[in-house]
Image (cartoon, helix red, strand yellow):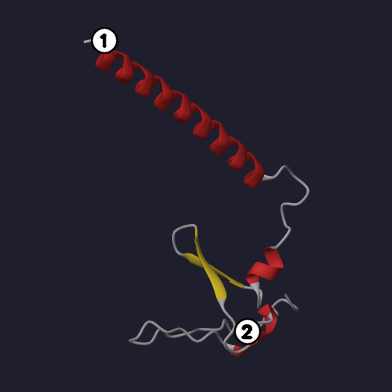
Amino acid sequence: MKEPISGGKTMPIATLSSKGQLVIPKEMRDALGVKPRQKVFLKIVKDHLVEIAPLPDDPVKHFCGIFKKGSSLTGALLKEREEDKKREEKKLNRFFRTSRVSKTGK
């Protein structure tokens, strides 16, 4: 983000079009460092305020590796799935064993 907007006498005002489009005033785009066609993130803050933040040009590349320092969530999920699979296989094996015994023990 660049220099904050100076505390001038006028506050930038924008008008919402009939299509729901909003043009961010130039001085605010410059302060945020937003370029034409760049996507921005909008968040409602305290019921009636809107926070605007520019998204990186390549969000995937920007956030890639952000969780490298901590434990791997993917690894934990894969381990949990493997445990689930073994548990389900045990249940199926017990089911098939009991169904075979009941058929042969007529």
- Looking at the picture, how far across and down is residue 75, in whole percent? 66, 43
Q: Amino acid at mark 2?
A: Arg
- Looking at the picture, how far across and down is residue 29, in whole percent? 63, 84
Q: In the picture shown, does residue 32 fall above or below 44?
A: below
Q: Nearer the viewer, residue 60 or 78?
A: 78
**Is the C terminus in the top left, top right, bottom left or bottom right quadrant?**
top left
- Looking at the picture, how far across and down is residue 36, in whole percent? 60, 89
Mark 1 falls on what kind of element?
Answer: loop
Residue 29 — which label?
Answer: 2
Furthest residue to the right? 69
Q: Amino acid at mark 1?
A: Gly
At 61% from the left and 37% from the top, the residue drawn is 79
**Is the N terminus in the top left, top right, bottom left or bottom right quadrant?**
bottom right
Q: In the picture shown, does residue 1 fall above or below 80?
A: below
Residue 8 — which label?
Answer: none
Furthest residue to the top? 105
Q: Which residue is the site of mark 1?
A: 105
Mark 2 falls on what kind of element?
Answer: helix
At 38% from the left and 87% from the top, the residue drawn is 17
